[in-house]
Image (tube, helix red, strand yellow):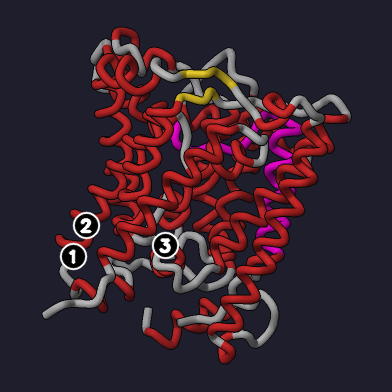
Amino acid sequence: MELAEQQAAAKKRMSWLLGGILLGLLNTFAVGTYGALGVSRNFVVIDEFLVRLFGTNLATTNSYLSLMPTQVDWLFMILPGMVIGGFLAALLTGTLNPRSVPRLWKSRFGDSKPKRFATAFAGGFLLLFGARIAGGCTSGHVLSGAAQLAIAGFLFGASIFASGIVTAKLLYRRKAS
Amino acid sequence: MTASYPIIAQAVVDTVGVVGGVDARAIAAGLLTGIAFGAILQRVGASSYEMIVNMLRLKDLTVMKFFFLAIAVGSLGMYVVDSAGTAHIGIAPLYLLGITVGGLIFGVGWALSGYCPGTSLVAMGEGKVDAAITVFGGLVGALTLSLTWDWIRPALVDPLNYGPKSIPDILGVKPLLVAAVLAAIIVAFVIYLDHISTGRKPAAGKAHGTPVGR
């Protein structure tokens, strides 16, 4: 997308005020029906499905994968739902964006796709590796956990913002040269 | 909407190829909840690399205000529902080492990718190729954690593990009261954030809470 189009897309966005209220109500609805919103566990469930698909016995012998449900459940369906929700919302508002390198990244690190893809991969790896050590991510631990007043949620939230802010500031610090 | 649950659910169950023992209604409800979750994140701009990284750079706090407000509304909502006796509240265990170390690792990944696990899925749905690669990295990261769990658990999860602990547990007061106080604090903080962010950039403050494309 061209810059002008991107700015037009940004102007069409929902306000943080309405979005925050809607997401809070959605999480209330979720907790009232089946459970709080969470995402990161579902990555492990996909891994469990994949190792079974490839015929290994890791799904039963591995101490972590064997904790996962063997069938899709309510929480798992959040994952495909989010992909579909993102697609539909973008489609209906004309904001589908099949780009490889984000604009801000390009302005700092250039338009090399391998460079961006390698960083995106490493970032994803650290996100899920860290989230599963902690037992949740931004959704499960903070959006849901802090709302449920779990101390773990506040500790996790403070940790991710601390290292996230430091890392982002380092990545985008002014060049010395 | 209730009537259409089983039809959608059957399609989903067929697609996934799972037979028997699956609660079709729960599956459909999960899918619809996920769709709503993804759509809200997309509409607010939380699945945008720029919005996340600029939040972490403390340049644009739109997503932070959105997210904190959602916690406040959710907290109050959940405990209002809970006081009616029907909520599925599940408090996560508090283990100091794993949650802190895991969170610090997560934060680095958050700034590098510009996504969190949920928003990477939403951004992938929008067609963003780098987000799809973040999802792939996430699958590899989750598998790596699974394969190293026998070392990580005794080092980071078992020690200093206090089990499920919530603020109302520790204070010995009603959760709804704590939720109300927390919501009030968060709303005050969000108003403050909105004030400083619109104050810092007067040209951007066309209306309260209107995100401006940059």
Give the distance between the C-alpha atoms of the residues marked 1 and 3, in whole angstroms. Answer: 23 Å
Q: Which residue lies furthest to the right in this view?
A: B84
Q: Which residue lies furthest to the left in this view?
A: A177
Magenta segment range? A18-42
Tell me the kind of residue under disc 3: Leu
- Chain letter belonging to callout 1: A
| Picture residue at 81% right of the left edge, 36% below the top | B176
Tell me the kind of residue under disc 2: Phe
Residue beneath disc 2 = A117
- Residue B165 locus on image (x, y percent): 61, 24
* Nearer mark to the viewer, of 2 and 3: 3
* Nearer mark to the viewer, of 1 and 3: 3
Give the distance between the C-alpha atoms of the residues marked 2 and 3, in whole angstroms. Answer: 20 Å
| Picture residue at 41% right of the left edge, 26% below the top | A45
Whether the residues at callouts 2 and 1 have beta carbons within 8 Å, the answer is: yes
In the image, are marks 2 and 3 on the same chain?
Answer: no
